[in-house]
Image (cartoon, rainbow, N blue to C red):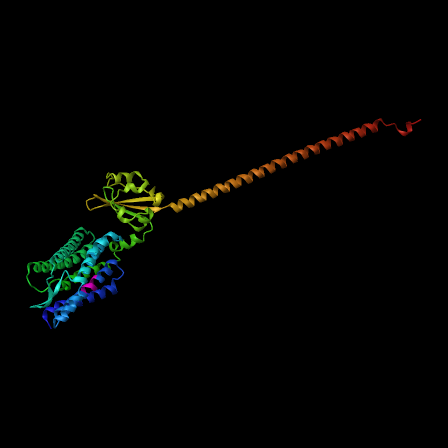
Amino acid sequence: MNPFAIPSLVSACCCTALALLLHLRASHSRSARMFSVLLTLMAAEALIEFGYRISANASQAHLCWQLNVHWPLVLAVLLHFTLLSVREGPRRISRSSLWLIYGPAALFVVLEASAHLITGPPQLAWWGWTYGPPENKLVRDVAYVWVLLVMIGSAATMIAAWRKADDPVARTRFGCMAIGYGIMALGVPLEIGFSVLGIRIPPLCVAAYALAVLPIGYGVMRHDLFRMSPAAAADGIISALRHALFLVTPDGRVRFANPSALHALGRAEVELIGCRVASLFAEAPHWVKDLDAGKLDARAEPKDVEATLRGPDGGTVRVLLSGACVLNSNGQLRGVALIGYDISELKATTAELERYRDHLEALVRDRTAAIRAAYDRLEEEMAERRLAQRQRSSLQEQLLESQQQLASVRPHPSDRP
């Protein structure tokens, strides 16, 4: 077997084994799933190159050349995986960004599949069959520029995430992944540079996969193995939090909002990130206004207050707003975490209870007034009866007196003549 085909076979084996391991142990993570897709594409490219190297004749090499048209997708998925890995929180990549990622790759795949404008027909070199130069080098040069931008940009993004990370687990993760990106960023430009200069050497890109995917895979696995630590579990907690959460920079701009906050405001994440925090409120407390103006004291203790968020379709959402200042080791303000507890339902329930209470009080007042009126009428009737009773007693007394008087003036029978 051609010894120059062994690196391609080793790369295919490493990518396949790591993809299976990630699928079994870390498939729940979005970045891990995307990395599994990347490993699958890398393994396919390495297997095709392995077949390229061990081709016995030109027809077999031509078949491998026809099969290897998906290589731009490897770079697009790599860039997508990079953005998923370094993004903070459970935020998703916008649709426009996905078009920018996969649009050029799809175009290069079509050009390669239809007319092979980037790689030329296979040629036999001293290390085996390899790709020849295309007839139109302009398209190849444009594709090479895109490849360099993707590789260098991905490596720079990962290095920046490693330097920015504060959590030890995240720092170790990004550090391991940056090493893998550095290996790929070194192999791809060297291969392109030698190709442009006309120096014939065995391709380095696929051979670098075996060295690059191991530290990247360890970084992905480390993030998954330590997912129950406070720092790693924060994404899941924030995503499942039912209350609105905002992370605001010291100058009063929104840096992060969880899904509950996006739902309450009825706005997309790309519209919310970077806007002034006071613009989110129809009624903002004074310490939010100080934060928006960049004047909030690091020693301030924001109190729980009621505030009004600007909801979707011009509506409002009543929240109980809490705040916590985030300080660095020197006691300087790094930002403020705002949590808004939605009290709209509580307010509606309270208002309904108040209306029901008022209704009951009105019923009680009406019933009391009716009972009072009936009591007053009964009192009047009783007074009239008592008066009539007294009058009847008086008449009976007068009648008795009249009878007595009449009896006293009536002559005795013995007195009759």
Q: Is residue 303 magenta?
A: no
Label count reads 0
Residue at 29% of width from left, 50% of height from top? 258
Q: Position of residue 146 (x, y in %)?
A: 15, 55
Nearest to the observer: residue 389 or residue 407: 389
Instruction: Using the rendered image of the protein, determine whether residue 9 is visible from the camera's viewpoint.
Output: no
**Location of residue 378 in the rendering, given as x and y in whole percent from the top left corner:** 63, 37
Seen from the viewer's position, the closer of residues 55 and 371 is 55
Q: Quadrant of residue 33?
A: bottom left
Q: Is residue 264 left or right of residue 125?
A: right
Q: Is residue 184 left or right of residue 391?
A: left
Q: Nearer the viewer, residue 392 or 316?
A: 316
Residue 153 in view here: yes
Q: What segment is highlighted magenta in the picture?
A: 38-43
The kind of secondary structure the magenta stretch mainly shows is helix
Which of the 4 image quarters holds residue 141? bottom left
Q: Is residue 358 left or right of residue 126?
A: right
Residue at the image position 40 percent from the left and 44 percent from the top: 347
Front position in the image: 270 or 299: 270
